[in-house]
């Protein structure tokens, strides 16, 4: 499982480095980077699928709005989790959910990504 927590400005460079390391291995990706790729004007989930088409077993994105300080201070926080595989979304939700932090499965992946990028 790879948690991709990279500033949007560095994502292209980091993805290139990861691609070189992976080779043909299959991975599950949890993306927490939000926004739109400045070069391709695509959502990061689309960039991930393109760059890792041979490597992705499953992927999802965890998208706010939220503030890191809220999570750090155990303030009640609910954010979206989106992706194409419901089973993987449930698996990731079960891993991250606790009494302060809750991932809500949202079936509108592109709408959620657009809202988070604004």
Image (spheres, rainbow, N blue to C red):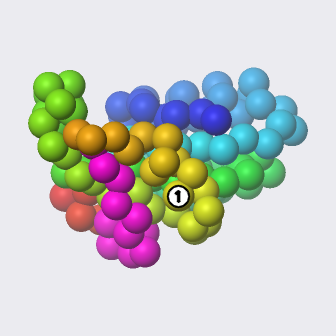
Q: In the image as oriented, which residue stretches furthest toward the front?
A: 99
Q: Does residue 107 show up magenta in the picture? A: yes
In the visual, does 4 lie left or right of 69? right
Which type of secondary structure does the marked residue at label 1 adopt?
A: helix
Q: Residue at x 43, y 32 (%)?
A: 5
Task: For the N terminus, give its image quadrant.
Answer: top right
Where does the image place residue 113, in percent across and percent down from the top left? 35, 62
Q: Is residue 89 left or right of residue 64?
A: right
Q: How many numbered circles does the render carry?
A: 1
Relative height, residue 74 to residue 83 (above, below): above
10 inside magenta stretch: no
Residue 38 appears left or right of 87: left
Q: Quadrant of residue 50?
A: bottom right
Task: Report the magenta residues as a range.
Answer: 101-113
Point out residue 60 in the picture as x, y percentages from the top left corner.
52, 54
Asked if 21 appears above or below 60 in the picture, the reply is above
Label 1: which residue? 89
Residue 88 in the image: above or below residue 100:
below
At a point 17% along the width and 31% down the height, the residue shown is 74
Residue 3 screen position, x and y as percent: 52, 34
Residue displayed at 75% across by 24% down: 21
On-image quarter of the C terminus = bottom left
Tell me the residue at 39%/75% (across/down): 108
Frontmost residue, 82 versus 36: 82
Please tell me which residue lies in front, 77 or 108: 77
In this view of the protein, can residue 48 be seen by the observer?
Answer: yes
Number of other residues with Cα within 10 Å of mark 1, as a class: few under 14, some 14 to 19, many 20 or more: many
């Amino acid at each position: 499982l790879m948690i991709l927590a990279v500033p949007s400005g560095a994502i292209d460079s980091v993805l290139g480095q990861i691609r070189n390391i992976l080779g043909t291995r299959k991975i599950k990706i949890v993306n927490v980077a939000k926004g739109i790729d400045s070069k391709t004007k695509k959502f990061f989930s689309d960039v991930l699928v393109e760059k890792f088409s041979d490597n992705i077993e499953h992927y999802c994105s965890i998208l706010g709005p939220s503030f890191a300080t809220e999570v750090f201070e155990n303030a009640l926080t609910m954010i979206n989790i989106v992706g194409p595989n419901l089973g993987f979304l449930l698996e990731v939700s079960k891993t991250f959910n606790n009494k302060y932090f809750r991932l809500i499965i949202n079936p509108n992946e592109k709408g959620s990504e657009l809202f988070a990028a604004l």
